[in-house]
Every structure is written in C-alpha cells, then in structure tokens.
Image (cartoon, helix red, strand yellow):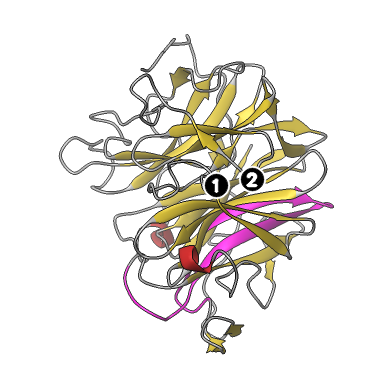
C-alpha cells in the first residue's frame, strides 16, 4: 500500500544540478589497461569497452569515484564481464584512475554469484566507525543479486556476499542498494532510524530492507507476505516503465530524500523524452518511517542532453545516477552516460 501526502512545493529537493563549468564526460574506457584476472589466469583488457555507473564519496579533501568497467570479453548489454575501478579528484571533475580494479570476480566465496558477469553498479556510504560499505550487483548472467563489501581505504575490499543471503530472497532478482545516510561533518554516514539501518533497492518497483550491521539485510514484506513496494511507475511520466534507486538516500529535516532513476515507456511515457530513455527524479519519504512515501517530483530534474549521454552503448539515452557527494559546499552528482561513460553535475 502506498501512503502519499502531497506538499505545497518541492522545497525539499536537492539541487538544482548543472553541468556548467564541468568537464564531461569525466571518465571513459581505456583500451590499453590490463589486469591479470584470477578467474582466467590471464591478462584482460578490463576497461576496454565501457566505463559507467559510478559511486562517489568525499574523503580527505578529495572525491573518490568507484566506477563499473566492462572488458571486451562478450558483447551486448550485460554480456561483458564487469569490474569496479577507483579514481580520485581534487576538484570533482578531473580524475586519475588506479591501474587495477579494486573489486572483481575472484576465487572466493562470491565467485558463484559473480561469474561470468562480474561486479556491477556500486553505491558507497561510510559507517559511523569509518568503514566504507559498498552495495553492488553480483551478476552470474542468470540472476542479479544485490551484494555487500566493506573497506577501510576504498582499495581493499572484503566481500560479504549477497545482501539477502540469510533470507528467502537470496535467489530473487535484486540490485541497486541505496542506503539511507545522514550528513555528519560534511560526510554521508549511514543513518540509524528506530534502531535500524534502511536501504531502498529494486528494479521496476522500489522496495526496502533493514539491517543492524549494514551487511546482512532483511527485505520488508507486505500483508500478503510479498515484497513491500514503496515507489512504483506512473503512466505518462518519465518513470512509466520502471523506477530504480540512485545514490544513497539522505535524511533531511523534511524527510528522507531519494534521487531515483526512471525509464520512459514506449506507449505510455513522457513525450518529451525518447522511448526507453533514463532520467532522474526525486522522492521524499517519512524520516521516522522511511517506507512511507510523502511526495515525489512531478517530472524529471535531470535528463540525457549531451552527445555522450545519447550515443553510447545504450542509445535510447541514459543519465543513470548512482554517486552523490557533498564537496566544497556543493553537491556533486555522478552518473552513467549511455552505459559507456561517467558524467558529473553539481549544485549551484
């Protein structure tokens, strides 16, 4: 059941965001970058084809971006092997990459979930103790499973396996984990609400899960013992085909603000967008009951505009938001551009 209370204005939203004065795209593929894959025991061109869908976090006066890179093994969307790389920047727009990926399929307990598709679409938050928590999609090319890893330095990661491994939803299609955070001295830190951590997740309809330790999650269920839906599609809108969480949600005085991604439908979509295009909206949830929707923007606030957002691997047009960082007094929003590049926009 959806509970909706409309506000008189959208004063609760983050932004507005602009690309003005920023270099776009900020990251792209490197056809020469090599990495010795522990699964294949040979060197692979790990970021040869595409670099996109980034997480972001501010740390020690810099912004760090964790990006998804696809190699040249395979073809088509979802047909490559993905690994997660790391890049850092002093200004939020000019980045330097590490030579090797920091999270990838290996000979470990997660290999059966990550092979052969890899590790996709990260989001990152900081825990109260300083630990970094990464949610990502483990892709075996059959079932997407939302998974969790932790790190002290953003480089060395400990995998904890699928987020729902201890529940009946282990083999349920799951992805896009947006953990609710609060602003603490300029950092986005995982927030406890009523003694638990909360996370938006899902593709198609948005669901929620709770946790006491940030690694083991339990999805919320409805009165029919099915997954509870907290945000759904709307006919005639940019999100008519599906909704999917964006960056980590933020606890504000107005409530929990979630930037989310919407896909435009082919027959019942927004005529101002192309069929299948991804754009971004915002939703507001109750700060004490985060599964209770209060408001949502009537249309998108961010859409594909640049050539690299319309002419890459996903030609219908994509600005797929996943990274958000508070840096030098501004919000920096990082997104995947047409499933091929990484872009950035910032608040004024």
Q: Position of residue 97 (x, y in %)?
A: 67, 71
Tell which of 343 and 113 is nearer to you. Answer: 113
Snapshot quadrant of residue 43: bottom right
Q: Is residue 336 left or right of residue 132?
A: left
Give the quadrant of the C terminus: top right
Q: Residue at image x 51%, y 22%? A: 284
For the residues bearing labels 1 and 2, Cβ distance under 8 angstroms? yes
Helix, strand or loop for disc 1? loop
222 is higher (above) or lower (below) than 268:
above
Q: Position of residue 194 (x, y in %)?
A: 67, 19
Which region of the structure is painted magenta? 47-76
Tell which of 171 and 91 is nearer to you. Answer: 171
Q: Is residue 232 left or right of residue 200?
A: left
Q: Earlier in the sequence, mark 1 or mark 2?
A: 1
Q: Residue at image x 58%, y 70%? A: 104
Helix, strand or loop for disc 2? loop
Q: Position of residue 57 (x, y in %)?
A: 70, 49
94 is higher (above) or lower (below) than 335:
below
Q: Position of residue 177 (x, y in %)?
A: 53, 43
Q: Residue at image x 44%, y 50%? A: 319
48 is higher (above) or lower (below) than 90:
below
Q: Is residue 173 left or right of residue 20?
A: left
Q: Residue at image x 68%, y 49%? A: 133
Q: Residues within 10 Å of mark 1 (few under 14, many from 20)?
A: many
Q: Residues within 10 Å of mark 2 (few under 14, many from 20)?
A: some
Residue lying at the far bottom in this picture: please name it.
Answer: 42
Using the rendered image of the protein, determine whether residue 152 is visible from the camera's viewpoint: yes
Give the quadrant of the N terminus: top left
Residue placed under numbered mark 2 in the picture: 215
Measured Cα–Cα span from mark 1 to mark 2: 6 Å
Residue placed under numbered mark 1 in the picture: 163
Using the rendered image of the protein, determine whether residue 51 is visible from the camera's viewpoint: no
């Amino acid at each position: 059941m959806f509970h909706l209370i409309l506000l008189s204005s959208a004063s609760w939203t983050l932004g507005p965001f602009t690309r003005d004065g920023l270099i776009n795209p900020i990251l792209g593929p490197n056809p020469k970058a090599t990495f010795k894959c522990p699964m294949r025991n040979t060197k692979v061109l790990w970021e040869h084809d595409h670099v996109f869908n980034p997480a972001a976090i501010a740390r020690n006066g810099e912004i760090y971006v964790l990006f998804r890179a696809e190699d040249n093994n395979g073809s088509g969307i979802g047909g490559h092997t993905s690994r997660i790389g790391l890049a850092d920047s002093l200004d939020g727009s000019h980045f330097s990459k590490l030579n090797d990926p920091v999270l990838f399929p290996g000979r470990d307990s997660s290999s059966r979930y990550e092979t052969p598709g890899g590790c996709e679409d990260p989001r990152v938050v900081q825990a109260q103790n300083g630990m970094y928590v990464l949610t990502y999609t483990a892709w075996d090319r059959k079932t997407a499973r939302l998974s969790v890893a932790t790190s002290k330095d953003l480089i060395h990661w400990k995998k904890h396996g699928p987020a729902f491994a201890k529940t009946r939803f282990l083999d349920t299609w799951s992805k896009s984990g947006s953990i609710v955070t609060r602003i603490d001295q300029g950092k986005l830190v995982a927030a406890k609400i009523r003694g638990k951590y909360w996370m938006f997740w899902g593709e198609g309809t948005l669901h929620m899960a709770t946790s006491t330790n940030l690694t083991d999650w339990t999805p919320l269920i409805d009165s029919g013992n099915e997954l509870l839906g907290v945000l759904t599609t709307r006919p005639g809108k940019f999100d008519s085909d599906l909704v999917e969480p964006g960056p980590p949600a933020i606890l504000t005085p107005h409530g929990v603000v979630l930037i989310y991604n919407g896909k435009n439908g082919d027959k019942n979509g927004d005529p101002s967008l192309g069929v299948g295009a991804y754009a971004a909206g915002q939703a507001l949830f109750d700060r004490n009951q985060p599964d209770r929707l209060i408001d949502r923007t009537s249309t998108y606030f961010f859409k594909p505009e640049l050539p690299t957002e319309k002419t890459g691997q996903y030609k219908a047009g994509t600005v797929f938001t996943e990274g958000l960082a508070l840096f030098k007094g501004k919000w920096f929003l990082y997104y995947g551009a047409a499933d091929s590049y990484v872009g950035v926009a910032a608040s004024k």
